[in-house]
Amino acid sequence: MSTVIIYASRHGCAEKAARVLESKLENNVAAVNLKKNKNIDPAQFDTVIIGGSIHAGHVQGKIKKFCGEHVDILKTKKLGLYLCCMEEGEKAQAQFTGAYPAELRDHAIVTGLFGGEFDFERMNFLEKAIVKKVAGISASVSKIKEDQIEQFAAALNEAK
Ligand SMILES: Cc1cc2nc3c(=O)[nH]c(=O)nc-3n(C[C@H](O)[C@H](O)[C@H](O)COP(=O)(O)O)c2cc1C
């Protein structure tokens, strides 16, 4: 049984989540950065996990494109979808709804909102200015939800 985690990450949070998931999943797992490998073929795996992050209200275009191009094959797989973002509650949920097509959200056996990070070391000048203005935050902060990642991995490990 093979699993692939296909992710996109601007400052490394969705990538960290992929690494944590990789360590907690029981199957043979590959983690693939969509920015570096655009030609990954989900047909080759039994389980597919897709993870992105939200910037200015939207998930990465690469995630949208990948989901759109592979929707039919993804609907035949054990599917997990996750998102990293700093909003909480209903806003986070609405961002998740906007990030993934309904067909895939309905098909997924597990979905996860893993929290997020503001990493000032990795932001450019404009990003720092936006985060200061919009979120009122001017230093790095991590709100990754390890418990949510744990539950997500457990659900996939239990799905036979
Ligand atoms: C410029 C900028 C804009 C952001 N916009 C949003 C947003 O609209 N909604 C949200 O929930 N989080 C927002 N975030 C927080 C990111 O989702 C968070 O930093 C996340 O951990 C990024 O994951 P990544 O490093 O994998 O890209 C924003 C962060 C930055 C730097």
Image (cartoon, rainbow, N blue to C red):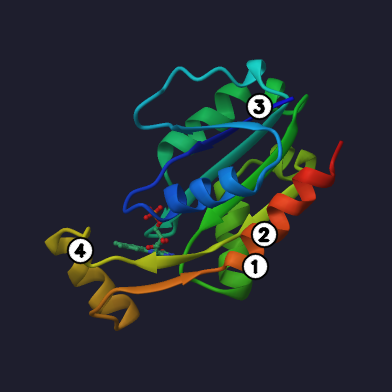
First in residue order: circle 4 vs circle 1: 4
First in residue order: circle 3 vs circle 1: 3
Q: Quadrant of residue 119?
A: bottom left
Q: Which residue is mark 4?
A: 121
Q: Nearer the viewer, mark 2 or mark 3?
A: 2
Q: Which residue is mark 1?
A: 147
Q: State whether label 1 is within 8 Å of ligand 1.
A: no
In this view, the residue farthest toward the bottom is 136
Q: Which residue is mark 3?
A: 71
The quarter of the image holding the N terminus is top right
The three-letter amino acid code for the residue at tag 3 is Val
> Is 81 drawn above or below residue 135 in the view shown?
above
Residue 77 drawn at (x, y percent)? 75, 28
Q: Which residue is mark 2?
A: 150
Q: Quadrant of residue 61?
A: top left
- Tell me which residue sits at (42%, 31%) in the image: 34
Q: Quadrant of residue 105?
A: top right
Residue 127 lies left or right of residue 33; in this view the side is: left
- Tell me which residue sits at (70%, 22%) in the image: 72
- Tell me which residue sits at (50%, 71%) in the image: 87
Mark 4 and mark 3 residues within 8 Å of each other at the beta carbon: no
* Secondary structure beneath label 3: helix
Give the total number of marks visible in the rendering.
4
Q: Nearer the viewer, mark 3 or mark 1?
A: 1
* Secondary structure beneath label 1: helix
Question: Whereabouts is ligand 1, in terms of quadrant?
Answer: bottom left
First in residue order: circle 4 vs circle 2: 4
CA–CA distance between discs 3 and 1?
Answer: 29 Å
Q: Is residue 109 visible?
A: no
